[in-house]
């Protein structure tokens, strides 16, 4: 019988991939995002992520009961949730360059676990497993939003200066 906690925790067994399962789960999440935005159904993506976020605490705790590791590498539902946060929150996240930046910065924050992500990771159970990726997603959303705003300001300054010269 298929264990629903394993199915959800490994995000339909993507976490069982032998090399870089977290990066693969993040990449698959980005592909789903591109699919959803291409059909103009972002709201469904948001609803699915909210449902996964809510259910994942229970299923990850269930999965951890049968596992010796505090944060097993095959548990990748946290990457799916964390990667989804900036995709949903960042303006212009339907632009491929922005999507690429979101993917790269999320992996950066998730792998390096800078403060206070490193503290949240130490929390026992599903909260520690999931919430560190949530914070990595929030850091990514903030950074990519600031970069986007900066680029937008530079473009506006450039065109205003060009308009004033002519």
Image (tube, rainbow, N blue to C red):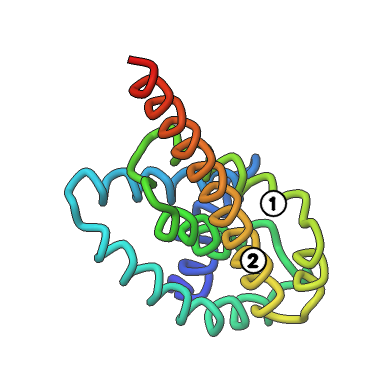
Query: Which numbered circle lies on residue 136?
Result: none
Foreground: 9 or 26? Answer: 26
In the visual, does 117 lie left or right of 139? Answer: right
Q: Where is residue 23 in the image (x, y as percent from the top left)?
A: 59, 44
| Residue at the spot 36% in from the left edge and 46% down from the top edge | 92
Quadrant for the N terminus in the image = bottom left
Name the N-terminal-most of marks 2 and 1.
Answer: 1
- Using the rendered view, name the quadrant where residue 89 is placed: bottom left
In the rendered view, would you say 50 is above or below 58?
above
In the displayed structure image, the side of residue 97 where residue 111 appears, left or right:
right
* Residue 25 visible in the displayed image: no
Number of other residues with Cα within 10 Å of mark 1, as a class: few under 14, some 14 to 19, many 20 or more: many
Looking at the rendered image, the quarter that the C terminus falls into is top left
Residue that extends furthest to the top in the rendered view of this protein: 166
Label 2, label 1: how far apart the Cα atoms are: 9 Å
Q: Position of residue 120 (x, y in %)?
A: 76, 73
Location of residue 101 in the rendering, given as x and y in whole percent from the top left corner: 53, 38
Q: In this view, does 46 lie above or below 91?
A: below
User: Which element type, helix, strand or loop, lies under badge 2?
Assistant: helix
In this rendering, does residue 71 appear at all? yes
Which residue: 46% across, 81% down? 54
Nearest the viewer among 42 and 6 is 42
Residue 131 image-quadrant placement: bottom right
Give me the disc on residue 109.
Answer: 1
The vertical placement of 132 against 36, above or below, is below
Q: Is mark 1 on a helix, strand or loop?
A: helix
Position of 158 relative to 37 (above/below): above
Task: Read off the residue under disc 2.
Answer: 135
Q: Is the residue under label 1 in contact with that under label 2 (CB below 8 Å)?
A: yes
- In the foreground, 14 or 137: 137
- Horizontally, is 136 left or right of 100 in the view? right
| In this rendering, position of residue 154 left or right of residue 127 | left
């Amino acid at each position: 019988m298929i264990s629903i906690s394993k199915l959800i925790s490994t995000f339909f067994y993507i976490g069982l991939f032998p090399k870089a399962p977290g990066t693969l789960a993040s990449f698959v999440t980005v592909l789903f995002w591109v699919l959803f935005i291409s059909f103009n159904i972002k709201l469904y993506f948001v609803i699915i992520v909210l449902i996964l976020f809510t259910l994942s605490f229970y299923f990850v705790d269930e999965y951890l009961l049968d596992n010796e590791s505090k944060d097993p590498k095959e548990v990748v539902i946290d990457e799916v949730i964390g990667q989804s946060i900036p995709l949903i929150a960042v303006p212009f996240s339907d632009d491929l360059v922005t999507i690429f930046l979101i993917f790269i910065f999320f992996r950066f924050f998730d792998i390096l676990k800078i403060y206070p992500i490193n503290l949240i990771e130490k929390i026992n159970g599903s909260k520690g497993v999931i919430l560190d990726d949530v914070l990595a997603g929030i850091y990514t959303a903030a950074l990519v939003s600031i970069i986007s705003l900066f680029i937008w300001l530079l473009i506006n300054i450039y065109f205003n200066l060009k308009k004033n010269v002519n």
